[in-house]
Image (cartoon, grey):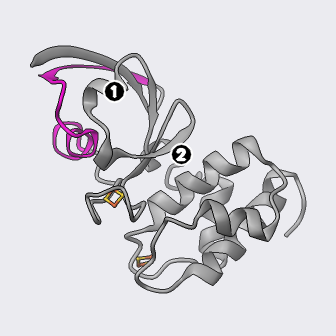
Amino acid sequence: MVKTIRFTLNDKPVSLDIDEDRTLLWVLRTELGLTGAKYGCGEGACGACTVLVDGEALPSCQLTVGFAAERRVTTIEGIGAEGKLHPIQRAFVRHDALQCGFCTPGMILKAHSLLAVNPNPTRDDIVEALDNHLCRCGAHVRIVAAVQTATDMLKGGKP
Ligand code: FES
Ligand code: FES
């Protein structure tokens, strides 16, 4: 059913007259022009489409746009900007923790949600948090190292 759906997207208010059952991932990509969240499996199993909803990392391929109503949605485009990268993004660059980059937005947003609730994760905590995020390029070891470095950066350390 077409409804007016209002939510906050990357700190800005959004209002759409849209079928509330449409998938959030596709609304972000096709109606709102935010292509950072990727379509991987479409089944909630790869993490490529991850966005933050009220700070929680969730697979946007499994959410309707109606679910986002009155909530705060953050995509990778809302995390940092060119020339002003978020520390997690800087750590990914530093560790060369990406190859094709398809999984990277989801990895970064998942790490972001982890560090928001656990600012001092162990390596095992990081591995567990990223467990259902797949990287077909096999960059997992570097990705985990990047999140460890980001942890230090966010704590004000000097990695
Ligand atoms: Fe959503 Fe894979 S595309 S989890
Ligand atoms: Fe290619 Fe992870 S960098 S899928």
Provide residue 24's location: percent of width, then percent of height.
27, 38
Examine the rendered structure and indicate whether residue 66 appears above or below residue 145: above
Q: Quadrant of residue 46?
A: bottom left
Residues in magenta, as a range:
12-33
Q: Can you tell which of label 1 and label 2 is closer to the viewer?
A: 1
Q: Earlier in the sequence, mark 1 or mark 2?
A: 1
Kindly identify which residue carries mark 1.
Answer: 67
Question: Is 47 in front, or is 139?
Answer: 47
Taking the spot 71% from the left edge, 76% from the top edge, the residue there is: 145
Q: Is residue 71 left or right of residue 84?
A: left
Provide residue 134's location: percent of width, then percent of height.
45, 72
Provide residue 126's location: percent of width, then percent of height.
70, 64
Taking the spot 40% from the left edge, 82% from the top edge, the residue there is: 136
Examine the rendered structure and indicate whether residue 95 appears above or below residue 52: below
Residue 29 in the magenta stretch? The answer is yes
Residue 13 at least partly seen: yes
Residue 96 at least partly seen: no
- All told, the count of numbered labels is 2
Ligand 1: image quarter: bottom left
Q: Quadrant of residue 88?
A: bottom right
Q: Name the residue type under label 2.
A: Ile
Q: Name the residue type under label 1.
A: Phe
Q: Is residue 130 left or right of residue 137?
A: right
Taking the spot 22% from the left edge, 40% from the top edge, the residue there is: 23
Kindly identify which residue carries mark 2.
Answer: 79
